[in-house]
């Protein structure tokens, strides 16, 4: 750069000198010519003078060149300084960039470290949580091993249950019964045992149960077994060993699909029985009474059945059930011109001391349950079929042409069937989160055996055909639930309508509840029928058929302990029972019973 500037300056100076010299060369001849033409004396400067001026001019130019050279040198120094500063700035910038890059890299590393640290912390938390859950599960398993709530066996869960009970009953009029009350046997005023009271202590309602549950694909399998000791063998007595036999209460299996369908078969609570949740088994809304016969007005049965149910979004349930039939029967004045059952065949595993009806078809029960968000509601229907065999010539009619001249025979025997049906409804509402109010009703022909009192399903016409009896059942319940205390009130009635006719052959009243039946002896006590001390005299001329049974019940349960070790509770109960008979020839016989029951129970957890 410096060289280029110096060369340029030199060329500029040379350029200025050459024209000057050329000018001098031009001027000189002109001057000489002038001299020749004019005068002999010279008028311009001399050559020495011009040379001196030229020297001065050259010196001045050289001085200018030097000044320019100094300026160029100074500028070069400044440029060099600037270049140095620029280099230093670039170095600093490079160092700063390097530091920035290092800082960015360090920040990225720190961020990676933070992310890694967060991940490590999350992993530690998860490990700690998993460890805590594992510890809890291990502790739970250890606890289950020490005191298991259920038993796990080959993919199923087995849960034992039940309770042990110490119970008693006091009746002011003796019935010769344990804590299970035969409501339709409350004695009439003239009975000798009506004049004495009775006390029984019992552990027979103690119950054991076993629930088995398993699941495969979308199906839940459930099996349930339940038993108590409220049955009697031929050697059972209250003398010494009190060896009462175990009986089957429930024994059924169920397949419940995830789409809401369920199929249940075995001995279980009848579909007639009210439930607390849908139509689910094991959610039966049983009265809170101590009496295992429950309370008058409660409709129920435990019997064989096969049930199909469908759950619609836990708000509506529809169910249908085929159930074991039976005909309970009561009649007076009838001729022996019909038959529909007999004592059980011991070889066929029936009880030879009990009567069984020979049924044609199972009972059909349909139910719809609703839970709209407040309360539980049910409507249900029962269809039954009663059948007997008629022997028209057992009691030959007046014109005996058909019966071979009036001789009793089996001629013309035939089977006859009658249909029975009933319609019922249940409602249960929870008030104030502590009070449950329930209503139940059932009415129909031939549905008496589904009531607690055990009223008859049918009677007989004079020609031997069965006649289903009209019955009504109603119950109101009020229950107050507290953490350690439950109070209950029940009021119920069961009513059966009379049905009777005059037999045209014998002239007697036949059927149930006839006003022509002799009831004159219902108020008169009789002498014992035997001398062994174990038989009060039976009432003579007391043909009283039950019209209605009414019961009012009050009781409470106090839970002394309710926790992981089970439940311990006790409670008393008072019941008033009134059994009214249809009016006969003398008045309307009426029996009354007062009962006090107590219970002390320990429930398995």
Image (cartoon, helix red, strand yellow):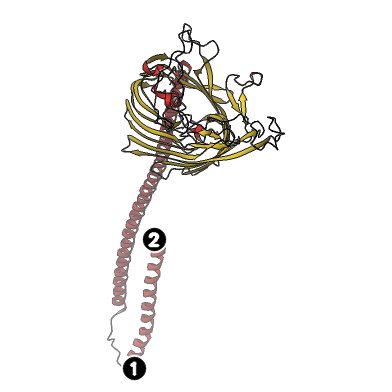
Q: Nearer the viewer, residue 309 or 206?
A: 206
Q: For residue 111, which quarter of the picture?
A: top left
In the rendered structure, which disc, 2 or 1, sits on the residue that comes first in sequence? 2
Image mark count: 2
Extreme-bottom residue of the structure: 37
Quarter containing the N terminus = bottom left
Label 2 and label 1: CA atoms lie apart by 54 Å
Task: State the residue at coordinates (37%, 74%).
Answer: 17
Q: Secondary structure at mark 2?
A: helix
Mark sitting on residue 78: none
**Residue 219 appearing in the image:** no
Left or right placement of residue 513 versus residue 324 in this view: left
**Residue 470 appearing in the image:** yes
Quarter containing the C terminus = top left
Q: Secondary structure at mark 1?
A: helix
In the depicted structure, whether residue 398 falls above or below residue 96? above
Left or right placement of residue 249 versus residue 108 in this view: right
Query: Where is residue 66 shown, x and y percent of the image?
Result: 31, 63
Mark sitting on residue 2: 2
Q: Nearer the viewer, residue 553 or 278?
A: 553
Left or right placement of residue 46 versus residue 309 in this view: left
Mark 1 = which residue?
A: 37
Query: Where is residue 454 shown, x and y percent of the image?
Result: 48, 29
In the depicted structure, whether residue 76 falls above or below residue 310? below
Q: For residue 376, which quarter of the picture?
A: top left
Query: Where is residue 284 shown, x and y percent of the image?
Result: 46, 32
């Amino acid at each position: 750069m410096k060289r280029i500037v110096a060369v340029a300056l030199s060329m500029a100076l040379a350029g200025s000198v050459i024209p000057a010299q050329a000018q001098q060369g031009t001027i000189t001849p002109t001057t000489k010519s002038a001299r020749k033409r004019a005068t002999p004396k010279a008028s311009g400067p001399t050559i020495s003078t011009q040379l001196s001026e030229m020297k001065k001019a050259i010196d001045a130019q050289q001085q200018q060149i030097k000044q320019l050279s100094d300026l160029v040198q100074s500028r070069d120094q400044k440029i060099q300084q600037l270049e140095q500063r620029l280099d230093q700035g670039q170095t600093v910038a490079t160092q700063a960039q390097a530091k920035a890059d290092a800082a960015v890299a360090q920040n990225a590393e720190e961020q990676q470290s933070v992310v890694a640290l967060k991940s490590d912390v999350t992993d530690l938390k998860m490990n700690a949580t998993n460890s805590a859950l594992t510890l809890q599960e291990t502790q739970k398993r250890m606890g289950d091993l020490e005191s298991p709530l259920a038993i796990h066996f080959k993919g199923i869960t087995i849960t034992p249950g039940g309770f042990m009970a110490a119970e008693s009953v006091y009746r002011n009029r003796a019935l010769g019964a344990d804590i299970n009350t035969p409501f339709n046997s409350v004695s009439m005023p003239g009975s000798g045992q009506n004049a004495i009271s009775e006390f029984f202590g019992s552990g027979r309602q103690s119950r054991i149960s076993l629930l088995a549950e398993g699941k495969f694909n979308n199906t839940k399998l459930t099996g349930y077994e339940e038993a108590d000791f409220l049955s009697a063998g031929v050697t059972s007595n209250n003398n010494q060993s009190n060896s009462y036999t175990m009986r089957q209460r429930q024994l059924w299996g169920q397949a419940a699909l995830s789409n809401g369908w369920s199929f249940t078969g075995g001995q279980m609570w009848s579909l007639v029985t009210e439930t607390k949740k849908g139509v689910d088994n094991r959610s039966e809304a049983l009265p809170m009474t101590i009496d295992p016969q429950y309370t008058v007005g409660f409709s129920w049965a435990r019997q064989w059945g096969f049930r199909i149910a469908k759950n619609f979004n836990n708000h509506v349930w529809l169910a249908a059930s085929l159930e074991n039939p039976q005909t309970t029967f009561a009649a007076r004045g009838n001729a022996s011109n019909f038959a529909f059952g007999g004592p059980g065949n011991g070889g066929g595993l029936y009880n030879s001391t009990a009567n069984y009806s020979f049924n044609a078809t199972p009972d059909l029960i349909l139910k719809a349950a609703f839970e709209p968000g407040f309360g539980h509601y049910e409507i249900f229907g029962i269809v039954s079929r009663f059948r007997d065999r008629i022997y028209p010539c057992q009691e030959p009619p007046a014109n005996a042409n058909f019966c071979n001249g009036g001789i009793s025979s089996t001629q013309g025997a035939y089977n006859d069937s009658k249909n029975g049906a009933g319609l019922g409804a249940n409602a249960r509402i929870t008030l104030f989160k502590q009070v449950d109010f329930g209503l139940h009703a059932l009415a129909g022909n031939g549905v008496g055996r589904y009531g607690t009192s055990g009223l008859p399903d049918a009677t007989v016409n004079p020609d031997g055909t069965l006649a289903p009896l009209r019955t009504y059942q109603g119950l109101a319940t009020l229950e107050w639930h507290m953490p350690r205390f439950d109070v209950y009130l029940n009021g119920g009635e069961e009513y059966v309508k009379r049905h009777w006719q005059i037999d045209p052959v014998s002239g007697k009243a036949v059927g149930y509840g006839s006003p022509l039946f002799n009831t004159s002896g219902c108020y008169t006590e009789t002498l014992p029928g035997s001398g062994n001390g174990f038989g009060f005299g039976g009432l003579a001329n007391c043909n009283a058929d039950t019209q209605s049974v009414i019961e009012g019940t009050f009781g409470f349960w106090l839970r002394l302990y309710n926790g992981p070790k089970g439940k311990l509770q006790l409670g008393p109960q008072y019941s008033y029972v009134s059994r009214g008979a249809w009016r006969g020839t003398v008045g309307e016989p009426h029996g009354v019973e007062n009962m006090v029951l107590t219970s002390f129970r320990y429930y398995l957890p």
